[in-house]
Amino acid sequence: MDYPRPLEDREVLVARGVERRQARLRGWLDGYDGPRPLYRIELFLDGDRYTATAMDMFESLTRLRRQLEPGGWAIAVQGARRDTYPSGMCRDMGGGMRISVMRTGHETSEADLVDTLADAELDRIVTVAEQEAWHAEWWEAATGRRL
């Protein structure tokens, strides 16, 4: 198989305060680092190119969001919602291309899966730190254990 292999190439909504823009989002399976795949994501916004690479698409998205947050930008995709996070299986077996929608006090199931890079409502988007904090709260409520 030839690499990089495109996985996503489309327009997404990005926002900063009341400002709204369309940006081009591209995602690839970039090849392999030993036995592990590498996933790359790029965002083209106002002539700037942001890019991140990781062992799964969710982590690539997280790294990309960390680059955008200092400028106040947020990407309106499912993987940036407060209440979404990938399970270990989603990361290991599916490359983080799908994530779970989490409900307080409930474990997730296959019915809770959404595409990481699919569009999401802007009012559900939070910072990486807020998402990680909510995931830790959800985990403790669902399992009785701390992360």
Image: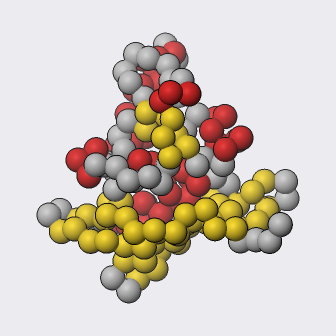
| Residue depicted at 66% across the width and 34% down the height | 89
Q: Is residue 27 left or right of residue 76?
A: right
The colouring scheme, among rainbow, by chain, secondary structure or one colour, is secondary structure
Compare residues 9 and 82 and report the one nearer the observer.
9
Q: Residue at x 65, y 61 (%)?
A: 39
Q: Is residue 96 above or below residue 53?
A: above
Image coordinates of residue 4 in percent, x first then y, are: 71, 71
Q: Is residue 64 visible?
A: yes
128 w.r.t. 21: above or below: above
Instruction: Give the left or right position of residue 7, taking residue 123 as reference.
Output: right
- Horizontal and vertical percent position of residue 113: 51, 35
Q: Residue furthest left?
A: 18
Residue for point 40% across, 69% down: 11
Q: Is residue 133 visible?
A: no
Viewer-proximal residue, 131 or 81? 81
Which of these two is toward me, 109 or 140?
109
Q: Residue at x 55, y 63 (%)?
A: 8
Residue closest to the eye, 111 or 108: 111
In this view, the residue farthest toward the bottom is: 47
Q: x, y (%) of residue 29?
A: 68, 63
The location of residue 86, given as percent across then percent down, is 54, 39
Total of numbered circles in the picture?
0
Q: Is residue 61 left or right of residue 119?
A: right
Q: Say which quadrant the N terminus sits in.
A: bottom right
Location of residue 60 with respect to 96 vertically, above or below: below
Would residue 144 appear left or right of 71 to someone viewing this image? right
